[in-house]
Image (tube, helix red, strand yellow):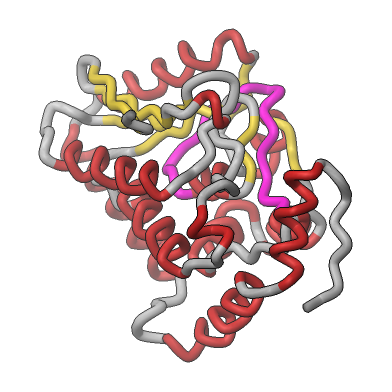
Amino acid sequence: MPQVRVERFAGVARVVLDRPDQRNAVSHDMLEELAAAFDALDAEPQVRAVILAGEGADFCAGADLSDVTIIRADRDYASGFEASLRTVSTHPNPVIAEVQGSALGAGCQIVVACDLAVAAEDARIGIPSGKLGILPNFESIERLVLSVGPKRAGEILYAGRVVSGAGAAAWGLANVAVPAAELTERTFALAERIAGLAPLSVRGAKRGVRTAIEHLSVDRFGESDRVSEFDAMAAEAFGSEDLREGIRAFRERRSPKFRGK
């Protein structure tokens, strides 16, 4: 059964993560479908703005911890996740995250990869990866730092800080926080405003913003020595007993007992 669907309106496409029974947790199939959806929209000139939303009560509660490749610490998941995020961040039109409920871990990373975000005031947004023993990929950490600054990024990553939608707007994780009942309407209003402007101007502006961000970013391939140490730490975390303990504790609804191994 498809895990991502695309809805089309006048000038606006809405890409929906569609696993509400699993709180839209990210799986391998979802990653592939998400990338395919954005690739297909590249070829639709009538689309001038894209909304990325989650079906049901949550935007995306994180990675699917029942996915066997995550349990086995398969690097293909991490690389596939980043490839999917890049299809979102480099899409030629502005992408707006419509955030309700939980946007945690992978969900928060998806929000940060979008150009804009409208959040419900009571949404919960953050990357509490330390509670599981996971280390987010370098590019996601970099995007977070560029979005909220190093100190707030540190609080999110080091202390597992989860902020409300209102807090996310204050920190720069979202553009605005609105009452939950108004979320879809307000997100569409922003998307329709963008879609009503000159497409060449908007696309050119997005390319300019992306170029500015890329100028501030580390080139993984051109400066591989700067990220190789991080990649080694990420591999150690993904292969650690702490990660296995974190996943067990999550499933058993108890506090994990980490040993740094």
The image shows residue 81, relative to residue 226, as above or below, that is above
Q: Quadrant of residue 41?
A: top left
Residue 238's spot in the image, x, y percent? 61, 70
Front residue of this view, candidates 257 and 49: 257
Q: Indicate whether residue 161 is drawn in magenta.
A: no
Residue 258 in which image quadrant: bottom right
For image coordinates 64% across by 14% down, the residue present is 179
Does 140 sit above or below residue 38?
A: below
Residue 86 place in picture, x, y as percent: 35, 55
Q: Is residue 253 visible?
A: yes
The residue lying at 62 percent from left, 18 percent from top is 178
Residue at screen point 41% across, 66% down: 76
Q: Which quarter of the image is occupied by the C terminus?
A: bottom right
Give the camera-side residue of 229 and 175. 229
| Res. 151 visible in picture | no
The image shows a total of numbered marks equal to 0
Q: Describe residue 98's horizontal placement relative to residue 39 as left or right.
A: right
Position of residue 214 in the picture relative to residue 166 (left or right): left
* Magenta highlight range: 113-128
Does 124 appear in magenta? yes
